[in-house]
Image (tube, rainbow, N blue to C red):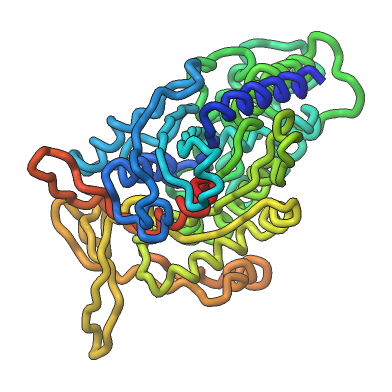
Amino acid sequence: MSDDAKIALDTLTDRAAGLVNPSVRLGVTGLSRAGKTVFISSLVHNLLNGGRLPVFEPVRSGRVSKIRLEPQPDDAVPRFQYEDHITALVRDRIWPDSTRAISQLRITLDYESASGWNRMFSPGRLSIDIVDYPGEWLLDLPLLSQDYRTFSAATVARARSGIRRELSAEWLALCEAAQPQAEADESRTRALAEAFTRYLRACRTDERSLSTLPPGRFLMPGDLEGSPALTFAPLPDLPDGRPASGSLHAMMERRYEAYKTHVVKPFFREHFARLDRQIVLVDALQAINRGPEALLDLESALADVMGCFQPGTNSFLSSFLTRRIDKVLIAATKADHLHHESHDRLEHITERIVSRAMERIGGSGAGVEVMALASVRATREATVNHDGHPLPVIVGTPIAGERINGELFDGERKTAIFPGDLPRDPDSLFRQTDEAPGQAVPEVNFVRFRPPHIEETGGGLKLSVPHIRLDRAMQFLFGDRLA
């Protein structure tokens, strides 16, 4: 009840401020390396620098008169360092660092309403508060409804299956040697927590690309590193009943509850529960390239993430006490790594991955859409002759250290690659696991490219960053608020 009251108070405060300065809070999330930082940087850069946005109607029609960055409303939240990130992208041609903690940025648009009636009553100004947070933190929200025994049983069962069995061997061996009812020992507790964290990190490596990895702060501890709230681990085969006071089981359970109280609940109350719109960035290509187990794990993780959303619509009066996410965009990133002929297939595969969550969100009355996009287009398309037949390829500059057919690239030379074909039937990727475990997954040549070279204008201002469907994403996420 206390949390609900605080959420209602925060919502009322935000809505009251919105009467004077209309705003929309846009949450940007995605699991590791999905491209959150790049998405925000490109969106802001294209708005500020007159990017090519033909599908974003308010800009295309000329109704937007001024766009500017303004101080964010939440002084206790770190600012999204847009200037540093865009410098890395445009001047240095390197991808900016991944999202490690929550941050925020406000961009304000002055516009003329398309409706004469609205022009009489609307100030013609909208502030978009972009809230960037790690998707791994979202994976923690389901823990709020799980006690320690339930959390342990689910985590251990997952660790004992498939490829995770090998990765979790060290941690599970320590668990087997531990006695839950034995007296609590700080050294043993720390050893278990460290082994568990190593297991989670091993799951997240590029070679594995597994996604279901709660608790999220174990991978991104920040200033909580070493605290008791992050020094616990699941224990297998826990007996029924309350743990004995002073036992290892009791200590682990107490610290798990502290993690929920001091880490998960504040994030939910102060940030997540205040969102109006949400974009979820999905790196489906990486999962497809790593095989069926990574793909199914991504499906499970996204179901958990999107199951935490509070989708729906609010009436004018109810919106002052409760806040629901009324639009969710699921964006399959890195579309520039494929020829445009495969973009619709990438969208269909992503729809299949998030089908359960989409059904729930759509049933709530909220708008939901899936699209393939590239926040920054790092390649261009071309056609080459292969054995007398035209072959669609993409051309770009691979990052130094990338290999293609055994050839090592230095980060300076461009090359053309055939990215491969995605299947027409998305279910075929899942049937290969369920019905034919040994069957090969369609290969996608996933190569990391450097950001494109962008010329400077005479005054030193960088031209807008090229993209794929970023304008369509803007139109869906907040175009209606500028009508």
Q: With 462 as the anchor, is 13 left or right in this view? A: right
Relative to 466, residue 78 above or below: above
In the picture as drawn, the residue positioned furthest to the bottom comes out as 388
The answer to whether residue 472 shows anywhere in this view is yes
Foreground of the two, 247 or 279: 279
Total count of labels: 0
| Location of residue 403 in the rendering, given as x and y in whole percent from the top left corner | 26, 57
Q: With 78 as the anchor, is 384 left or right in this view? A: left
Q: Which residue is drawn at 71% across and 38% down?
A: 316
Foreground of the two, 153 or 229: 229
The answer to whether residue 280 shows anywhere in this view is no
Q: With 243 as the anchor, is 263 left or right in this view? A: left
Relative to 395, residue 157 above or below: above
Snapshot quadrant of residue 99: top left
| Location of residue 415 in the rendering, given as x and y in whole percent from the top left corner | 19, 63
Quarter of the image that includes the N terminus: top right
Q: Which residue is drawn at 25% across and 61% down?
A: 406
Q: Residue at x 40, y 45 (%)?
A: 39
Foreground of the two, 278 or 195: 278
Snapshot quadrant of residue 183: top right
| Location of residue 28 in the rendering, given as x and y in whole percent from the top left corner | 50, 40
Snapshot quadrant of residue 285: bottom left
In the picture as drawn, the residue positioned furthest to the left comes out as 458
| Location of residue 205 in the rendering, given as x and y in whole percent from the top left corner | 45, 43
Q: Residue at x 54, y 50 (%)?
A: 480
